[in-house]
Image (tube, coloured by chain):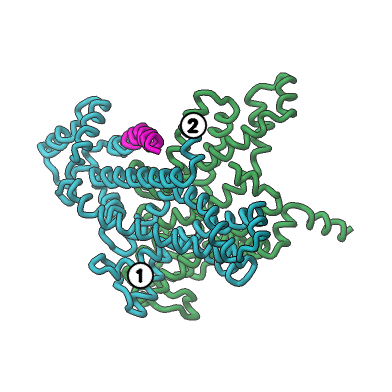
């Protein structure tokens, strides 16, 4: 019985991902980051906002594994709480992108006509602009802060999901089973939400996951510019920004938050890659 | 080719109009009265009236846009609120620095990326290939501003080889170009590698082997030449990303440039400067993409034929 269950697990998509070396390792890294983000107050050794000026800019030690910042705050605790900020912003932003992008892309691909041409023109227009520039334009409008960062990043990545979903829906809408559903009298809403989108979902989910990694970098960049989370909320980019003034005396303030970003993003990319392999959808992603 | 150039230039006009409308609307979409966000603490009602009149904010929106566009085309982008200088003058001071950095970073990442990608393809599955693949992974995952800070830490603070910040000497360009370049190298190397491996499987390559040509001549004289086309395609699509990298890196290295000016103005809410910088950056991205397209069309007749 156990053998049968373990064979079933090994042949399932999740099993294939977790049992591959890079999938397993990246899943472990991601699990640690997510646990830190969710249980930040429980796992961080100190409170993230308690200042202790006599302990300012202390190098890593047993008491403070990653050292302290210019206000004597424990860097490890701030990085753990920063994980919460970064992940929340990235996940919410990409959630906004996926939700709006899928709706626009599905409607454009399914109905075609003028609406499709307008959506395609808007997507093509934003495609050549770097996400950072789109995000900066939006921040200029909405103003700096955590909420506006989420909106800015969400809109910056919109084109990607609209394009991907549109391509998937265009490919699927002429399939025989869709024709059959139409002939049975199903409405547009039913066809799009019950048949087209569920089938278009796997590549979008994987693309969404990979985009979450890029969104973490974009959030950190905006935070570094002072346009993201405002103090005292800890964010990885914001920590590095304040660390630049201490670069000669406390380089660890810059090194550790950057390392946290790099490890998280590499883990997301490797995990996404492992899912692409397991689902065998590389061609669908590339064609879109 | 001339027809293609004219066609592509004409295509830019609607794009420019849409982008300029979005940038124009920034000042109207900011929460609250745009004049409130422009006024400094302690401003008088007279100053408020003067600002309203100067920006023509009492006129209908389409008229305001027309006036703004006409002024902009004459090179008048208004006056900076905090720096109290014409925005055009500020841009003229900063633009050459950004252009130099962007062009150098683009050239560096293209050349190194092609060489790295070609070596990885030729020595597939060797340690060279694995090193290039690791570089690609790092280049696409490490934030460029963090890389810039690490380069400052190692080469400027610890070793003292290059200046920490500024733009007074040529050596001050080395670290910023490296920091922007890694992302670009990753992109170019990945495309070159995949394209070369794909072309190596084609029939004409087998023919070249049968003719007895040396391995190096086939790889670099034939396969790489064909592989350059997708590289140019991807570069023309992603040229904006490299320019976007310049925005971030200027700020990290405290270099003068449009990026630094934009970020500082955004933090100070100096909207005329923000609009001017965003407009110039958008134009740079559009022109960069256009140049990329033209290079692609010059290399591949199918591109210009398919679009005429």
Q: CA distance from mark 1 to mark 2?
A: 49 Å
Decide if residue A49 is on the left or right side of residue B75: right
Of all chains in the rendering, the one displayed in green is A
- Identify which residue is drawn at 42% across, 50% down: B239
Judge whether B145 appears above or below B27 on screen: below
Of all chains in the rendering, the one displayed in cyan is B
- Please check the rendered image and state whether residue B19 is part of the magenta-colored stretch, yes or no: yes
Question: Where in the figure is residue A99, as x and y percent of width and height?
Answer: 55, 38
Of the numbered discs in the image, which one, if any, rests on residue A119? 2
Neighbour class for label 1 at 10 Å: few (<14), some, many (≥20)?
some
Neighbour class for label 2 at 10 Å: few (<14), some, many (≥20)?
many
Q: Earlier in the sequence, mark 1 or mark 2?
A: 1
In this view of the protein, which residue sits in the foreground, B193 or B205? B205
- Please check the rendered image and state whether residue A144 is part of the magenta-colored stretch, yes or no: no
Q: Quadrant of residue B121?
A: bottom right
- Identify which residue is drawn at 86% across, 60% down: A2
In this view of the protein, which residue sits in the foreground, A54 or B185? B185
Decide if residue A244 is on the left or right side of residue B125: left
- Using the image, name the chain to which the residue with label 2 belongs: A
- Identify which residue is drawn at 12% across, 39% down: B47
Q: Quadrant of residue B14?
A: top left
Taking the view exactly as shown, the residue that stands out farthest to the front is B211
Of the numbered discs in the image, which one, if any, rests on residue A71? 1
Query: Magenta segment range?
Result: B1-22
Decide if residue B73 is on the left or right side of residue A247: left
Question: Where in the figure is residue B171, as x and y percent of width and height?
Answer: 30, 70
Residues at badges 1 and 2 in contact (C-beta under 8 Å)? no
């Amino acid at each position: 019985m156990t053998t049968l269950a373990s064979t079933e697990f090994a042949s399932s998509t999740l099993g294939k991902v977790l049992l591959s070396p890079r999938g397993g390792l990246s899943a472990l890294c991601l699990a640690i980051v997510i646990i830190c983000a969710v249980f930040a107050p429980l796992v961080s050794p100190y409170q993230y906002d308690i200042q202790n000026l006599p302990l300012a800019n202390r190098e890593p030690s047993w008491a403070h594994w990653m050292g302290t910042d210019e206000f004597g705050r424990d860097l490890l605790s701030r990085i753990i709480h920063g994980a919460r900020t970064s992940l929340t912003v990235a996940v919410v932003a990409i959630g906004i992108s996926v939700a709006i992008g899928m709706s626009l892309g599905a409607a454009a691909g399914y109905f075609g006509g003028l609406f499709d041409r307008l959506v395609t023109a808007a997507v093509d227009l934003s495609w050549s602009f770097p996400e950072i520039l789109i995000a900066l334009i939006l921040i200029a409008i909405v103003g700096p802060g955590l909420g506006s960062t989420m909106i800015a990043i969400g809109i910056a990545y919109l084109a990607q999901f609209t394009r991907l979903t549109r391509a998937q829906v265009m490919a699927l809408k002429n399939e025989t089973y869709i024709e059959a559903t139409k002939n049975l009298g199903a409405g547009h809403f039913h066809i799009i939400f019950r048949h087209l989108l569920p089938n278009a979902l796997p590549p979008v989910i994987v693309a969404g996951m990979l985009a979450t990694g890029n969104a973490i970098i974009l959030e950190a960049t905006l935070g570094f510019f002072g346009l993201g989370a405002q103090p005292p909320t800890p964010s990885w980019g914001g920590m590095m920004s304040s660390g630049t003034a201490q670069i000669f005396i406390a380089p660890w303030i810059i090194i550790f938050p950057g390392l946290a970003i790099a490890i998280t993003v590499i883990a997301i990319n490797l995990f996404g890659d492992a899912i692409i392999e397991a689902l065998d959808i590389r061609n669908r992603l590339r064609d879109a | 080719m001339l027809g293609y150039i004219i066609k592509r230039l004409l295509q830019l006009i609607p794009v420019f109009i849409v982008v300029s409308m979005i940038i124009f609307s920034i000042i109207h979409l900011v929460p609250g009265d745009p004049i409130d966000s422009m006024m400094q603490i302690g401003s008088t009602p007279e100053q408020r009236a003067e600002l309203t009149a100067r920006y023509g904010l009492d006129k209908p929106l389409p008229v305001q846009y027309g006036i703004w566009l006409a002024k902009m085309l004459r090179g008048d982008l208004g006056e900076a609120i905090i720096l109290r200088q014409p925005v055009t003058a500020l841009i003229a001071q900063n633009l050459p620095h950004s252009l130099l950095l962007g062009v150098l970073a683009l050239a560096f990442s293209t050349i190194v990326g092609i060489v790295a990608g070609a070596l990885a393809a030729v020595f597939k599955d060797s340690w060279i290939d694995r090193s290039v693949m690791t570089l690609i992974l790092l280049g696409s995952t490490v934030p460029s501003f963090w890389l810039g800070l690490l380069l400052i830490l190692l080469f400027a603070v610890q070793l003292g080889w290059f200046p920490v910040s500024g733009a007074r000497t040529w050596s001050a360009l080395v670290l910023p170009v490296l920091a922007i370049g890694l992302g670009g190298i990753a992109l170019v190397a990945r495309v070159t590698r995949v394209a070369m491996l794909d072309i190596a499987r084609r029939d004409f390559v087998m023919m070249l082997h049968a003719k007895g040509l040396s391995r190096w001549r086939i790889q670099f004289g034939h396969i790489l030449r064909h592989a350059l086309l997708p590289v140019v395609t991807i570069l023309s699509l992603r040229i904006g990303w490299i320019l976007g990298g310049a925005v971030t890196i200027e700020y990290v290295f405290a270099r003068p440039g449009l990026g630094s000016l934009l970020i500082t103005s955004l933090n100070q809410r100096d909207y005329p400067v923000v609009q001017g910088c965003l407009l110039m950056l958008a134009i740079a991205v559009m022109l960069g993409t256009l140049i990329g397209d033209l290079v692609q069309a010059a290399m591949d007749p199918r591109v210009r034929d398919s679009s005429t």
